[in-house]
Image (cartoon, rainbow, N blue to C red):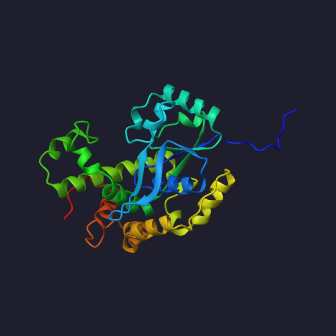
Amino acid sequence: MENRGAIKIMAGIVIRWIGGAGGDLLCSLLALKNKDLYMNISCHGTIEPETGAVLISNRHDLAHPSLVRLARETADSLDPELLKIDIHNLIKKHRRFILKSHLFNNEMEKYTEVVDLGFDLQFLPFIVQCNIEKTNIVVNNFTYNNLKFDITLQKISKKLNNEQKKQLITWNLVKDSIKMINKFALDNASLNTRDFFYNQKRIEDFFKGKGYEINFDVQFFSDWKDNNTKYLPSEKYQEYLQSKQYNYKDKQLAISERYILLALSGQRFTFLD
């Protein structure tokens, strides 16, 4: 007879997020508290002092090669069948694991638990600014030929100065992020980037329910929070968003906030001065 009262023990969790959402922080905090945890990255519990980026490194595991690639920005090129095999093999060996992923599709949800670290429009400036300031996204997008721009933007990109390139990347991040919010309901995700600042207990309770511990009372997190406060959305931006007065011409706003308002106003891309 089926025991309907039995607790279903999950084999592990894939934490999925868009760059800038704070996933490396989350993984690092989990690694500090759960020493027996298998991860597809190596967490060092330190931050880069100038940008506030969490320092991690790739973990090379020959037994599960696709899981190493899953943690990288190029995860969208992964063979889904190989990924499925690696995760199934991992489940056989490790009951507890946390995997980093930037791969947004519905395939992994069929054979393991996928948890999104989400955000809403109100917190979108934080995501965009962190992505711009903490990564090489601007340089990389103007280095390779496979730019994620439409044909017109690809043509003009070769004639831009550094500030214009940054604005163009910011616009594309804004548009892509808004699309991801809508497609994957990131504004209703179980975990939210804003909780790092305003509701840490929500994160603690979530992982406690999954059998994992997480502790925010550590110097590493305090340093991260102090360093990342500068990326928080402004009150003025939040007022514009709340009132739906998308005043993207307000120069008191951060450039990321202005481009979000430009996108929400339904306007096309333009350089903002």
Residue at screen point 25% across, 67% down: 249
Residue at screen point 63% across, 56% down: 213
Residue 238 appears left or right of 112: left
Say whether residue 5 is visible.
Answer: yes
The quarter of the rendered structure image containing the N terminus is: top right
Q: How many numbered discs sit on the rendered protein? A: 0
Camera-nearest residue between 119 and 40: 40
Q: Could you say which quadrant of the image residue 266 lies in?
A: bottom left
Q: Percent from the top left, x then y, of residue 18?
A: 43, 49
Q: Could you say which quadrant of the image residue 30 lies in?
A: bottom right
Instruction: Say above or below: 191 vs 224.
Output: above
Instruction: Say above or below: 89 vs 210.
Output: above
The quarter of the rendered structure image containing the C terminus is: bottom left
Say whether residue 265 is visible.
Answer: no
Considering every residue shown, the one lying at the far left of the view is: 159
Considering every residue shown, the one lying at the far right of the view is: 1
Q: Percent from the top left, x then y, of residue 13?
A: 59, 44
Q: Percent from the top left, x then y, of residue 40?
A: 49, 42
Residue at screen point 30% across, 70% down: 253
Camera-nearest residue between 195 and 260: 195
Residue at screen point 46% across, 32% down: 66
Instruction: Say above or below: 176 vs 76.
Output: below
Residue 98 appears left or right of 260: right
